[in-house]
Image: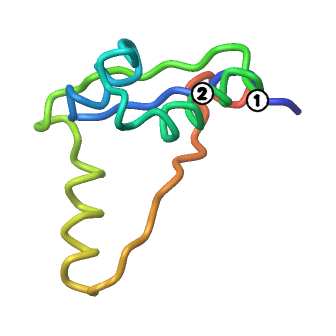
Amino acid sequence: MRITSIRFETDCLDLVDMITNPVYWPTFVSELEMFQRLHEDFEDVSVSHIPRSRNGRADSLAKKARTKDYIFSHIDQIRPDGGA
């Protein structure tokens, strides 16, 4: 089973702007190149802005990281199409 679509949601408008308008963010060129490489591995790659109030998972993870005093990342592997 091959995953062809990947979606990112963030409450950071600057991050969305960096990805959609990379020419205005030359300092982040190497990071933006890594994101562009995702387009080689997936047919559909999207990044969208969500309000901070809807970003409960990130808020919860950040609070846990602060209390445990270490850095971690989270990858949500739930497929929106139900795995079809």
Q: Label 1 vs label 2: CA separation? A: 8 Å
Q: Quadrant of the C terminus?
A: top right
**Left of 19 or right of it: where is 33?**
right
The residue that appears at 27% across and 86% down in the rendered structure is 69
Numbered mark located on residue 13 in the image: none
**In the figure, is residue 38 to the left or right of 1?**
left
Locate the N terminus by quadrant. top right
Residue located at (15% from left, 28% from top) = 51
Q: Is residue 72 left or right of residue 5?
A: left
Residue 12 x/y as whole percent:
21, 34
Q: Position of residue 9 (x, y in %)?
A: 36, 31
Q: Classify residue 61 as left or right of residue 32.
A: left
Instruction: Please report the residue visible at 22 percent of the width from the left and 28 percent of the height from the top.
Output: 14
Q: Quickly name the residue at label 2.
A: 6
The relative height of residue 83 versus residue 73 in the rendered view (above or below) is above
Mark 2 neighbour density, 10 Å: few (under 14) some (14–19) many (20 or more):
some
Label 1: state its secondary structure: loop
**Residue sitting at x 67%, y 21%:** 39
Instruction: Tally the marks.
Output: 2
- Please name the amino acid that badge 2 sits on: Ile
Q: Amino acid at mark 1?
A: Ile
Q: Residues within 10 Å of mark 1 (few under 14, many from 20)?
A: few
> Which residue is disc 1 drawn over?
3
Residue 7 % position (x, y):
51, 26
Q: Which residue lies most toward the right here?
A: 1
Tag 1 and tag 2, C-beta contact below 8 Å: yes
Q: Foreground: 21 or 82?
A: 21
Q: Residue furthest front?
A: 26
Q: Secondary structure at mark 2?
A: strand
